[in-house]
């Protein structure tokens, strides 16, 4: 967990601290509270708290519905608890939505009014800015883009449903595909054990391993199918990619772009469309939380 104290409109924090979350132990909320206290200004005025959290959550009430990694947070009122303890309004949304908001306000999406953000790493997360507003939806559950269906007969997703984008294009999905192909007898320099990661597969692909190359091509192919759907739904002027898996460059993006071009239902969607890498790196969540707090207290 990281906490930072900002002045309005300045993206350089005045104070910044981090602690281990220790999700396997109880007391996660107490550690969060102590972390915020450690950067709280002695006599300065704090206007609001913004928080990027794993979801699913309800941004309108500040409740975490249930989050896979923190078992004690089920219907957990983290927003109301922070607000009561620190006597300021507290606003939250999930980390992918806030990375999208951060990139729009401070990063690669600056100047764009319609932004699609995707993070490809252990999971696949998404966020959308439309008419300069973060799209949150009726329940606050909009743009769970990793859990959209790209093949109803596809492999199981981490969420339990079948054929979601995350089940094809996330790091673990790429690893799982390679393991299955190795088991089925595919020829490769890679070995079938726990040391196999998306990074190891990327290195093998760079050295010409055909199975490794096909694993990333497949991930890019399905990513293209998904983004063709997202263009039809949101019609952005920029698509921003964050997350570790998206750092592999043409290995993923050549097949992604070919797949997208083949599937987008009208070429007009691609006119002037920018496809760029995220600019904020590890700070996307903090800066997105800053942007959310700024926007929410003005609203
Ligand atoms: Zn899913």
Image (cartoon, rainbow, N blue to C red):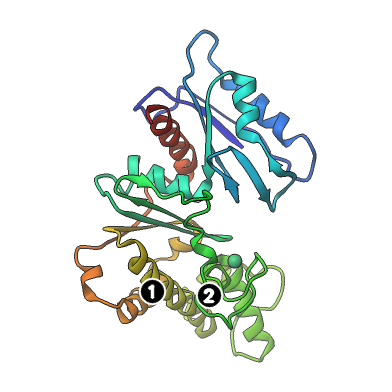
Q: Quadrant of ligand 1?
A: bottom right
Disc 2 target residue? 204
Element type at mark 1: helix
Element type at mark 2: helix
Q: Position of residue 21 (x, y in %)?
A: 69, 39
Circle 1 packing at 10 Å, graded few (<14), some (14-19), many (20+), is: many
Q: Position of residue 152 (x, y in %)?
A: 56, 80
Q: Nearer the viewer, residue 273 or 133?
A: 133
Q: Nearer the viewer, residue 267 or 65?
A: 65
Q: Position of residue 264 (x, y in %)?
A: 31, 76
Q: Is residue 15 above or below residue 224?
A: above
**From this viewpoint, which residue is outermost toward the front?**
138
Q: Nearer the viewer, residue 84 or 198?
A: 84
**From this viewpoint, which residue is outermost toward the top?**
43
Residue at image location 29% in from the left, 48% down from the top: 131
Q: Nearer the viewer, residue 184 or 289?
A: 289
CA gap, disc 1 and disc 2:
19 Å
Disc 1 target residue? 256
Q: Is residue 143 above or below residue 285?
A: below
Q: Is residue 129 above or below residue 218?
A: above
Q: Nearer the observer, disc 1 or disc 2?
A: 1
Residue contact at pointers 1 and 2, CB within 8 angstroms: no
**From this viewpoint, which residue is outermost toward the right?**
25
Residue at image location 29% in from the left, 78% down from the top: 265
């Amino acid at each position: 967990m990281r906490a930072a104290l900002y002045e309005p409109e300045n993206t350089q924090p005045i104070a910044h601290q981090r602690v281990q979350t220790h999700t396997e132990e109880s007391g996660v909320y107490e550690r969060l509270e102590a972390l915020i206290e450690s950067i709280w200004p002695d006599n300065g005025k704090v206007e609001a708290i913004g928080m990027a959290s794993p979801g699913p959550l309800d941004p309108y009430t500040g409740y975490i519905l249930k989050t896979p990694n923190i078992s004690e947070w089920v219907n957990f009122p983290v927003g109301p608890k922070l607000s009561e303890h620190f006597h300021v309004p507290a606003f939250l949304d999930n980390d992918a939505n806030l990375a999208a908001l951060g990139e729009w306000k401070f990063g690669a999406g600056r100047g764009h009014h319609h932004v699609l953000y995707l993070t490809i790493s252990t999971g696949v997360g998404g966020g959308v800015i439309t008419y300069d507003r973060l799209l949150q939806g009726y329940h606050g559950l909009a743009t769970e883009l990793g859990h959209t269906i790209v093949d109803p007969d596809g492999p199981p997703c981490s969420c339990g449903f079948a054929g979601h984008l995350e089940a094809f294009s996330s790091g673990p999905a790429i690893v799982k595909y390679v393991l299955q192909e190795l088991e089925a007898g595919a020829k490769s320099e890679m070995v079938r054990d726990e040391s196999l990661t998306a990074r190891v597969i990327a290195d093998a692909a760079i050295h010409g391993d055909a199975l490794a190359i096909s694993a990333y091509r497949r991930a890019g192919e399905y990513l293209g199918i998904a983004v063709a759907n997202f263009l039809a739904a949101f019609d952005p002027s920029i698509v921003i990619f964050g997350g570790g898996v998206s750092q592999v460059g043409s290995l993923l993006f050549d097949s992604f772009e070919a797949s997208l071009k083949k599937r987008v239902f009208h070429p007009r969607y691609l006119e002037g469309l920018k496809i760029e890498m995220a600019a904020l790196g590890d700070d996307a969540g903090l800066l997105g939380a800053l942007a959310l707090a700024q926007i929410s207290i003005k609203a």
